[in-house]
Amino acid sequence: MKRSIVLLLAVIVVLSGFFNIIADNYGAAGYTLYSDIAAYINNYPIQAYNIDGETVVLASDLKNYGFDISWNAQRRAVSIARSGSTVIIPQTDVYRNAKRAGQYHKKFVLSDIAAEIDGIPVKCFNIENRAAIYFKDLDRFGKVEWNAKTRAITLTVEGLPIGKETETRENPDVTLMYAMDGRTIVVGNDDVEAYKNVGWYTDISDVTSTLYANDGRSITVFRDEIAAYLKVGWFRTRPGEKMIALTFDDGPSRFTGAILDQLERYNSKATFFVVGSRVGAFSDVIKRENELGMAIGSHSWDHSKLTKLSKTALLEQKNKTNNAISAITGSGTSLLRPPYGATNQSISEVFGMPIILWSVDTLDWKTRDKDTTVRTVMNSVKDGDIVLMHDIYKSSADAAIELIPKLIDAGYKLVTVEELAEAKLGGLTPGQKYSTMR
Ligand code: NI
């Protein structure tokens, strides 16, 4: 009798070392860490949670999927084992995204109880006082696979019923956001703006770029990975692909809309360097430029020759224009085209934006002739060019309408100045002057 008590104490001492490790980082209960990925067992959805980027599932949920869950009071452990019992699949919908705002946790929420699969200890987490385990630890029972495209993790267990493939649904109350390094986070819709301010994006295309190889392959990578890929034979442009940036100065005007129609029709982009004082009167045009993904740049507040202005006056030119644009689009501009292309050090300093000049000057303001403008562009345009036009003349708008399909036929992709810089130079540097992106 005495001996068995000693033995039991010895077992407790040995095991408590193990449990201490588990309990070490015991986090506050009450978190709900819903995941932004889906989890399935034999095609049946199971609610997934996210702890530090890893998928976990509740041990108690596994009861419905053909597993026996029991409590071992002596070891304070949840035991998970395969059972021969009937599978009861839950009827509830499983959201891929969080049901309410998720949090990105840097600390494990480890449990003060243990979990074991077939008697082998596995990490145990505490989610609202329920035991949860890594989904990947279920690989003891079958094959665990990750599908990056559907963002789903699956466990296939032989001998258990296999359900129909279910579709995952987005949750309308939350938004999935992305970081440049590929991290994701699920936030409540109310928090989206706050997250945007600290480097999170709602559109995955804002954090990824497509790269191309000379043999025709393409790959989409996170922005932070681009430099590494460029070193090993990937390129920002398709082999042989040509790109140019059409730019329009002095607007907006009543002719801008026709140019936008044509750009939209041909799925093309351009950059509009607007005069700040005109913006308010054509707010619908600015709004549409923004919605269509055009770039909007500053062409000063009143078309002053900026080289003649004091720093105070320059700052006023910058801020008034930015505020006018921002009042409509929600954000100011980060591109400057100084009127007359006149620039100096003070302008670079005060504006703190890349200064965009041009490599093809159509002189459309002077000729006011559609055919001459079209001919000038088609005769001189080359890959990486920045084309200067003005959207305040009907002849220029007519020329643009003709040029857009012509340039596309000639193999050019029409992009914004920022996209051209991104493709050809890897981005823009504030204060630097650009007349071409070759
Ligand atoms: Ni101008």
Image: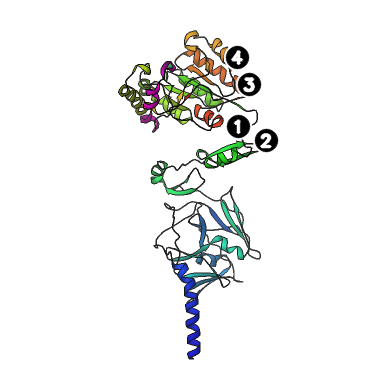
Q: Is residue 351 magenta?
A: no
The residue tagged 1 is: 237
Sequence-first disc among 4 and 3: 4
- Alpha carbon separation for disc pair 2 and 3: 20 Å
The residue tagged 4 is: 379
Which residue type carries mark 1? Thr
Which label number is shown at residue 410?
Answer: 3
Sequence-first disc among 1 and 3: 1
Residue 186 or residue 261, whichever sits in front: 186
Would the CB of label 1 be found within 8 Å of ligand 1? no
Q: Please tell me whether mark 4 sits on a helix, a strand or a loop.
A: helix
The residue tagged 2 is: 216
Q: Please tell me whether mark 1 sits on a helix, a strand or a loop.
A: loop
Sequence-first disc among 2 and 3: 2
Residue 79 or residue 338, whichever sits in front: 338
**x and y percent of residue 310 in the render?**
32, 20
Sequence-first disc among 2 and 1: 2
Lateral position of residue 95 relative to residue 410, left or right: left
- The boundaries of the magenta stretch are 325-349
Which residue type carries mark 3? Ala
Kindly indicate whether the residue at mark 3 contacts the one at mark 2 (C-beta within 8 angstroms): no
In front: label 4 or label 3: 4
Sequence-first disc among 4 and 1: 1
Q: How many marks?
A: 4
